[in-house]
Amino acid sequence: MSGMEAVDINNKAVISPTGVRRLRLGHLWIYAGDVVEGPEDPGAALVRVLDTAGRAQGYALYSHHSRIRLRYLSRDTEPPTADLWFNRLRASIQRRRGMMDKRAACRLVFGEADLLPSIIVDRYGDYLVVQTLSAGADALKPMIIQMLQEILHPAGILERNDVKARLLEGLDECRGVLGGSIPEFVEILEGDVRFLVDLLGGQKTGFFLDQSENRIAARSVASGKVLDCFTNTGAFALHFAQRAESVMAVDVSHDSLIQARRNVELNALRNVELREANVFDLLRELERAGEKFDLVCLDPPAFAKNRGALAAAKGGYKEINLRAMKLLKPEGILVTSSCSYHLAEPEFAELIEEAAHDARRYAQILERRSQSKDHPILAGMPETHYLKCFILRVL
């Protein structure tokens, strides 16, 4: 397979005892501070990993510019072959076969959680969207694309490497068609709701697939008057609209609301109002106006992109949850999420409790949820558990 031949597996990296302990605990990242000796070639994509006593620790993808210097790939003493990559890709896809039969769109490869570090593959019907988010993975991109074509025979493969994370790897942001062709929009079905997905311009790889199961679960408790905040292209809102009397869907992005309007029209819904506004401002405005809702949904973007932003993020999460609770009728439902990895689930739950106290309300936890099962969590690697979703009854 093309790609492996270009990798010099004679390059080695020596890691500290702390780094070895991380690997033994199941974590797949070694940070720059625990790399005692780097490879002779700083551009090496794949390196042999040794401890300070010279004992073999396996093989890892290498990123000279990144704080995450090594992404562990294999414990074997023999270097990884193209067959290892092919078998892992095929196994990752096979795990989702049942899901693929039920959903037109799902994540097929979730990076480290599928033992394919920094590689993302999402399926939208007959099309694939790929991200290679580290220098090592990017060097192997031609091989990965060839393997995906052999396994799945997609109508088109799109590269969505237009993400800031690549800049930390010394890589350019880029996007483009790598095989076949990509239409302007792809229609997918989630439950019985239809969506038009903009693969080239939409956020992430076109759609927030990680909330799919949470949207379906939250829909089952929707009724009456609903407020959907940070609606983006209307995914939660359209599910709520199947059961609610009315849905007000709010987002600050004009472009996102244009796409939301397309989705509303695609489903012939007449009970969805789209409103362009800053959610923080609108929540206060609705409270002053004495508005009340049967369900409020909060699905904001990540407020904490890094640990340094966590303190401010906590304030933001508490503020919107407090305001949402004040807008709920007695026995109303709050669906609230955080996709900030740096805000752990216990901390998020504590913020919700504090918000309930300050709002002079009580909150019953009906469900604690996480990302959809096509985004599995790898034991020993908490970074793979980033999405928290609570469904609460507010008394």
Image: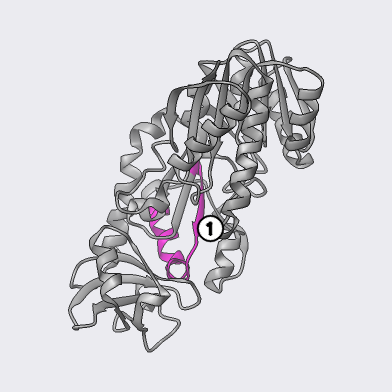
Tag 1: amino acid: Arg
Residue at point 53%, 44% (across, down): 339
* Residue 195 in view (yes/no): no
Query: Residue 156 appears at what percent x and percent y?
Result: 53, 49
Q: Is residue 311 left or right of residue 220?
A: right
Q: Is residue 259 left or right of residue 4?
A: right
Residue at point 69%, 21% (across, down): 327
Quadrant placement of the C terminus: top right
Query: Residue 93 appears at what percent x and percent y?
Result: 35, 45
- Please state the extent of the stretch shown in magenta in the rendering: 123-150
Q: Is residue 71 above or below residue 266?
A: below
Q: Is residue 106 above or below residue 332?
A: below
Q: Is residue 296 above or below residue 317?
A: above
In terms of depth relative to the viewer, which is nearer, 257 or 142? 257
Query: Residue 323 appears at what percent x and percent y?
Result: 68, 29
Residue at point 19%, 68% (across, down): 76
Was residue 143 drawn as part of the magenta stretch in this picture?
Answer: yes
* Residue 169 in view (yes/no): yes
Query: Residue 279 appears at what percent x and percent y?
Result: 73, 35
Quadrant placement of the N terminus: bottom left
Q: Is residue 352 above or below residue 150?
A: above
Residue at point 36%, 57% (across, down): 116
In terms of depth relative to the viewer, which is nearer, 212 or 225? 225
Q: Quadrant of residue 33 in the image?
A: bottom left
CA neighbours of label 1 inside 10 A, class few (<14), some (14 to 19), many (20+)? few
- Label 1: which residue? 307
In terms of depth relative to the viewer, which is nearer, 200 or 297? 297
Was residue 50 drawn as part of the magenta stretch in this picture?
Answer: no
